[in-house]
Image (tube, grey):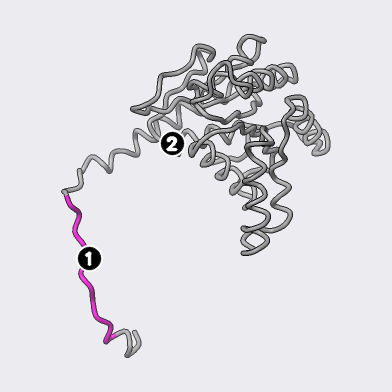
Amino acid sequence: MTENQNHVKKHQMKPWGRQLKGENSWTMFKVISEFVDGFETLNEVGPCVSIFGSARTKPDHPYYKKAVDIARLLTEAGYGVITGGGPGIMEAGNKGAHIYGGRSVGLNINLPFEQGHNQYIDPDCNLDFRYFFVRKVMFVKYAQALVALPGGFGTMDELFEVLTLVQTNKITKMPIILVGVGFWSGLKSWIQEVMLGQYYNINPEDLNLMPITDEPEEVVRIINEFYMEKGEELGPNYEL
């Protein structure tokens, strides 16, 4: 310890406002049980594509219909569909897989202000989660691609987490496709002009991680071409 460190004034830590419960240490067993349920279920499903988007999108909205079309095309291409299991874009993704004979997975999260799971999820692939971070692992581990339609904070959280995992090589690189030119173009322009152009906080090639399109057919083309060029067998993104 240096002489200067000997003379540093010690400051008192603030106390917790209430006593911490001893049971918090046992929370890990709840977490483990959710991982076990998720792994045992999704290991049997096969390669999927995760579809993200707003729970508030109504069935008559163009983006809802677009999500149904994307899920249908993914089903025809041999992929299952994973969503957050709720209403809106999530329901549309499950619907497109369900009515066209594909695998339809729902990863529900217990929230106080949203409805339960939608009716288009396969009964054996209908999972409930208490913890967001466990649910995110399931979204990413079993997805061969991510398709993000317009959404709110939850969609942004999921999107940027996957972008970070790919950018830092924590997971296998996979297609991350933004659907909705009018919705996403402003965000991507800000990333390019401010995050990259003014502050240099990302690399120029990082912009290539998130193509934007309005066409469901383009979504499936990007995914198919990615794996044709890669020339590898499909598999989970990482081993824990």
Residue lying at 57% horizontally and 31% vertically, measured from the top left: 52
For the C terminus, give its image quadrant: top right
Q: Position of residue 89 (x, y in %)?
A: 56, 24
Relative to the observer, which residue lies in front, 62 or 2?
Answer: 62
Q: Is residue 184 above or below residue 3?
A: above
Magenta segment main secondary structure? loop
Mark 1: give few (<14), some (14-19) or many (20+) Cα within 10 Å. few
Q: Position of residue 233 (x, y in %)?
A: 75, 32
Secondary structure of residue under mark 1: loop
Q: Quadrant of the N terminus?
A: bottom left
Q: Which mark is residue 83?
A: none
Magenta-colored span: 6-17
Q: Please determine whether, in this image, residue 197 is positioned above or below residue 82.
A: below
Which disc is residue 13 wearing? 1
221 lies above or below 202: above
Q: Residues within 10 Å of mark 2 (few under 14, many from 20)?
A: few
Q: Is residue 156 left or right of residue 115?
A: right
Looking at the image, which residue is at 51% across and 36% down?
Answer: 152
For marks 1 and 2, give the CA distance.
30 Å
Residue that extends furthest to the bottom in the rendered view of this protein: 3
**Would residue 6 be found to the left or right of residue 201 on screen?**
left
Task: Give the amino acid type for the residue marked by disc 1 in the picture.
Answer: Met
Which is more N-terminal, label 2 or label 1? 1
Instruction: Give the camera-side residue of 126 and 189.
Output: 189
Q: Position of residue 86 (x, y in %)?
A: 48, 22
Please, is residue 78 above or below residue 166 in the view? above
**Label 1 close to label 2 by CB (< 8 Å):** no
Report which residue position mark 2 lands on.
132
- At x 77% / y 25%, what residue is drawn? 217
**Of 182 and 99, which appears nearest the observer?**
182
**x, y (%) of residue 136?**
50, 36
Tag 2: amino acid: Phe
